[in-house]
């Protein structure tokens, strides 16, 4: 799934000619933990295998993140232990179970889960951004670009570099707004609605109402990060303004399984980037038929 063209997309923004010799860049990777790490690791490994110098910055304690063969890691201390991560994972599994609970009990558990995840993400972000020694060290390395997950905008804040975002989507559509991409509620279904691009008049009204509430949802999700942004950069700014400076948006989706919607020129679909490359279907069928 990882092609030479995709590699060119990653470093096209650096504006380095590759006509005489392949360009070997220095890529800083600021990932997000959990399932988000799977696609990020695939890119970091392949870019490192092709000769680029890849540095991945991860917390000392995490769920999935760790060292790799083709990239180097830099770790930083965090204010939580493995036991706290286990409680967050346990709460998440409890929410995903099909256990029948009263509505108020579901709400209570959902709020408790959100608070635990928020504390985990904020603690990780603050531990990295306000680690002066580490930030100074990274600034001296001369990175050409940063690859990050904007769901937690730490990478976009800490490096004023050409920024490449890898994501599936942000529930309040902050990514769409920051990229300046049109998203008409008349045929682009919003998160949590369960609608398709073929909506009735009533569904379009509901979808539009949900779209009108997205700024409030973004405010609830990111107001702590807005405070961190202003404190870290020393200026009155927001996460949305920082993300709007992103150079490339790598979207982990494909229109084979998505509803049609507008895209901006700097949005690249990379759905399945973390999947193993398999034989074409016709070859697989031929081998099964011809085999004794």
Image (spheres, rainbow, N blue to C red):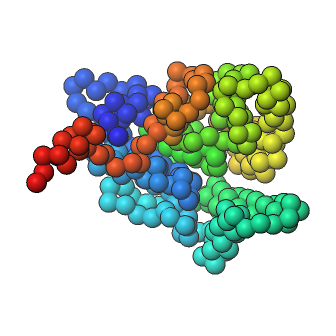
Count the marks: how many? Answer: 0
Q: Say left or right for 37 vs 216.
A: left
**Residue positioned 55% across, 67% down in the render:** 62
Using the rendered image of the protein, determine whether residue 245 is visible from the camera's viewpoint: yes
From this view, report whether residue 59 is shown above or below residue 292: below
Q: Quadrant of the N terminus?
A: top left
Using the rendered image of the protein, determine whether residue 142 is visible from the camera's viewpoint: no
- Out of 165 and 136, give the one closest to the viewer: 165
Q: Say left or right for 101 vs 52.
A: right
Q: Quadrant of the C terminus?
A: bottom left
Residue 11: x %, y % from top left: 40, 33
- Out of 203 and 52, give the one closest to the viewer: 203
Q: Say left or right for 199 vs 263.
A: right
From this view, report whether residue 189 is shown above or below residue 232: above
Residue 224: x %, y % from top left: 78, 51
From this view, report whether residue 226 is shown above or below residue 11: below
Q: Say left or right for 219 vs 56.
A: right
- Out of 118 and 276, give the one closest to the viewer: 276
Residue 13: x %, y % from top left: 45, 28
From this view, report whether residue 32 is shown above or below residue 208: below
Residue at the right extreme, as displayed: 104
**Residue positioned 67% across, 65% down in the render:** 97
Residue 21: x %, y % from top left: 22, 30
- Out of 290 and 84, give the one closest to the viewer: 290
Residue at the left extreme, as displayed: 292
**Residue positioned 50% across, 64% down in the render:** 64
**Residue positioned 29% across, 49% down in the render:** 49
């Amino acid at each position: 799934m990882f092609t030479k063209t995709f590699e060119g997309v990653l470093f096209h923004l650096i504006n380095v000619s590759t006509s005489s010799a392949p360009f070997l860049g220095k890529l800083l990777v600021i990932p997000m933990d959990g399932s988000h790490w799977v696609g990020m690791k695939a890119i970091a490994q392949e870019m490192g295998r092709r000769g680029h110098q890849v540095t991945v910055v991860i917390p000392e304690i995490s769920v999935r993140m760790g060292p790799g063969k083709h990239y180097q890691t830099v770790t930083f201390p965090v204010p939580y232990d493995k036991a706290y991560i286990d409680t967050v994972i346990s709460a998440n599994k409890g929410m995903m179970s099909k256990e029948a609970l009263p509505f108020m009990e579901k709400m209570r558990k959902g709020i408790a889960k959100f608070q635990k995840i928020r504390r985990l993400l904020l603690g990780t972000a603050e531990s990295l951004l306000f680690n002066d020694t580490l930030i100074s060290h990274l600034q001296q390395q001369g990175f050409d670009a940063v690859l990050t997950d904007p769901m937690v905008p730490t990478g976009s804040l800490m490096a004023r570099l050409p920024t490449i975002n890898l994501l599936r989507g942000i529930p309040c559509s902050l990514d769409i707004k920051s990229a300046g991409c049109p998203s008409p509620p008349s045929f682009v279904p919003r998160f949590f609605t369960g609608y398709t691009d073929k909506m009735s008049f009533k569904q379009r009204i509901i979808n539009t109402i949900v779209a009108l509430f997205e700024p409030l949802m973004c405010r609830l999700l990111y107001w702590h990060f807005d405070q961190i942004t202003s404190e870290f950069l020393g200026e009155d700014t927001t996460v949305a303004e920082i993300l709007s400076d992103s150079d490339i948006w790598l979207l982990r989706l494909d229109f084979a399984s998505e509803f049609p919607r507008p895209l901006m020129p700097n949005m690249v679909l990379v759905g399945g980037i973390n999947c193993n490359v398999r034989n074409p279907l016709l070859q697989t069928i031929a081998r099964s038929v011809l085999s004794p």
